[in-house]
């Protein structure tokens, strides 16, 4: 397995994986997510792939076929004047193809992202997990992530 930056030639497979993630989220929260869609369009994905502030890392097999990805965003803090300035690497989305699960692809991707965050001088890695996505929560707990803040909702 190798991990590298995504290329335009990876677009179709990444879109397929975005669909897998969307279906999981649509099952958990059908009131928010629309089944049969993806988070990004083909054109948006092409734009993100070329953006150094939004790197996508892909895990590929020996045939250079994408097995999983990590969409990241480099964010500068603070959001206000009462916070210490720092850089954060936000994992916007991490997915392992359902056919490659239980082969440590996610762990390898996460470890790669950690190394990249250190290389980029980031203070932290952050991400969001939807309530009800218990397998993702267990995975991130295993990776050593801890709750930083909690977002709550009241549905009207």
Image (cartoon, helix red, strand yellow):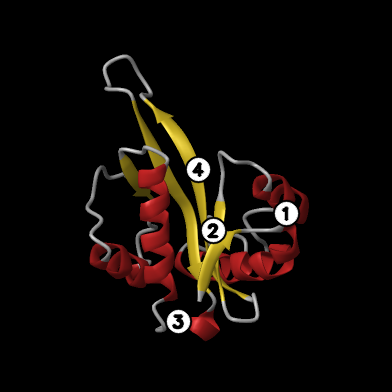
* Secondary element type, mark 4: strand
Q: Earlier in the sequence, mark 4 or mark 3?
A: 4
Residue 154: x and y in percent read: 36, 44
Disc assigned to residue 57: 2
Q: Nearer the viewer, mark 1 or mark 3?
A: 3
Residues packed near mark 4 inside 10 Å, few (<14), some (14 to 19) or many (20 plus) = many
For residue 36, side relative to residue 149 (left or right): right
Count of numbered marks: 4
Residue indicated by mark 1: 41
The quarter of the image holding the C terminus is: top left
Q: CA distance from mark 4 to mark 3?
A: 24 Å
Which numbered disc, 2 or 3, marks the residue that appears first in the sequence?
A: 2
From the viewer's perspective, tell me whether residue 136 is left or right of residue 45.
Answer: left
Q: Can residue 32 be seen at all in this image of the molecule?
A: yes
Q: Is residue 148 left or right of residue 44?
A: left
Q: Position of residue 114 (x, y in %)?
A: 36, 54
In front: 120, or 86? 120
- Viewer-side label of 4, 1: 4
Marker disc for residue 101: 3
Question: For the residues marked 2 and 3, what is the alpha-carbon distance in whole angstroms?
Answer: 17 Å
Q: Quadrant of residue 105?
A: bottom left
Task: Give how far apart the Cα atoms at labels 1 and 2 are.
Answer: 18 Å
């Amino acid at each position: 397995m190798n991990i590298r930056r995504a290329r335009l030639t990876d677009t179709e497979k990444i879109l397929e994986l975005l669909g897998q993630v969307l279906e999981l989220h649509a099952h958990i929260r059908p009131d928010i997510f629309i089944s049969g869609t993806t988070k990004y369009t083909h054109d948006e994905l092409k734009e993100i792939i070329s953006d150094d502030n939004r790197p996508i890392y892909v895990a590929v097999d020996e045939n250079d076929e994408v097995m999983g990805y990590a969409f990241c965003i480099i964010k500068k803090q603070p959001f206000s004047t009462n916070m210490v300035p720092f850089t954060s690497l936000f994992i916007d989305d991490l997915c392992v193809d359902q056919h490659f699960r239980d082969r440590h692809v996610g762990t390898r991707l996460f470890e790669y992202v950690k190394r990249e965050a250190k290389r980029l001088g980031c203070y932290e890695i952050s991400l969001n997990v939807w309530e009800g996505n218990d397998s993702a929560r267990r995975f991130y707990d295993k990776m050593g992530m801890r709750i930083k803040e909690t977002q709550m909702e009241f549905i009207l």
